[in-house]
Image: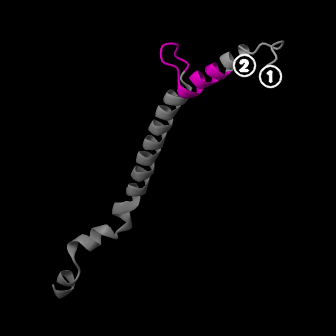
């Protein structure tokens, strides 16, 4: 009886490998879901090719192409 009371009940389950073996898998899957969600969000914000709301990179690249396209090769500026 004295041996049972000397160890807290919680520590038995916290350090028991049988009870914690699935925790690493659950944490890994949760982190994977979060990272994939953030990557999806960043991809949609930066590189969306939707004509109504293009992503930042697509709209910036379109502005660069329009600026280059407006260049007149024969025009000489002093």
Give x and y (percent) for residue 68: 72, 19
Q: Is residue 76 above or below residue 57?
A: above
Q: Which of the image's four quarters has the C terminus?
A: top right
Mark 1 touching mark 2, by CB under 8 A? no
Note whether 56 is above or below 11 in the view shown.
Answer: above
Crowding near the residue tagged with mark 2, few <14, some 14–19, many ≥20 C-alpha atoms within 10 Å: few
Where residue 41 appears, as percent x and y from the top left, is 46, 33
Measure how far apart labels 1 and 2 are at the Cα level: 19 Å
The quarter holding residue 73 reads: top right
Disc 2 on helix, strand or loop? helix
Whichever of callouts 1 and 2 sits on the residue coming sooner in the sequence is 2
Residue 63 location in percent, x, y?
62, 20
Q: Which residues are magenta?
A: 49-64
The quadrant where residue 71 appears: top right
Q: Which mark is residue 15?
A: none
- Confirm whether the magenta stretch covers residue 55: yes
Q: Would residue 45 appear left or right of 20 to someone viewing this image?
A: right
Identify the residue at horizontal 52%, vertical 13% (top origin). 51
- Residue 72 covered by magenta stretch: no
Identify the residue under disc 1: 78
The outermost residue toward the front is 78
> Helix or strand or loop: what does disc 1 sit on?
loop
Name the image quarter holding the N terminus. Answer: bottom left
The residue under the point 82% across, 17% down is: 76
Disc number for residue 68: 2
Q: Residue, x 38% and y 66% (percent of image)?
A: 17
What is the number of callouts on the image? Answer: 2
Residue 69 % position (x, y) = 72, 14
Which of these two is toward me, 3 or 29? 29
Of residue 27 and residue 59, the one placed in the foreground of this image is 59
Residue 49 is left or right of residue 11, and the answer is right
């Amino acid at each position: 009886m004295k041996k049972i009371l000397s160890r807290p009940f919680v520590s038995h389950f916290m350090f028991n490998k049988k009870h914690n073996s699935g925790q690493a898998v659950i944490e890994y899957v949760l982190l994977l879901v979060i990272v994939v969600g953030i990557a999806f969000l960043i991809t949609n914000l930066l590189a969306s090719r939707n004509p109504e709301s293009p992503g930042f990179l697509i709209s910036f690249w379109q502005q660069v192409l329009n600026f280059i396209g407006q260049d007149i090769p024969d025009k000489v500026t002093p």
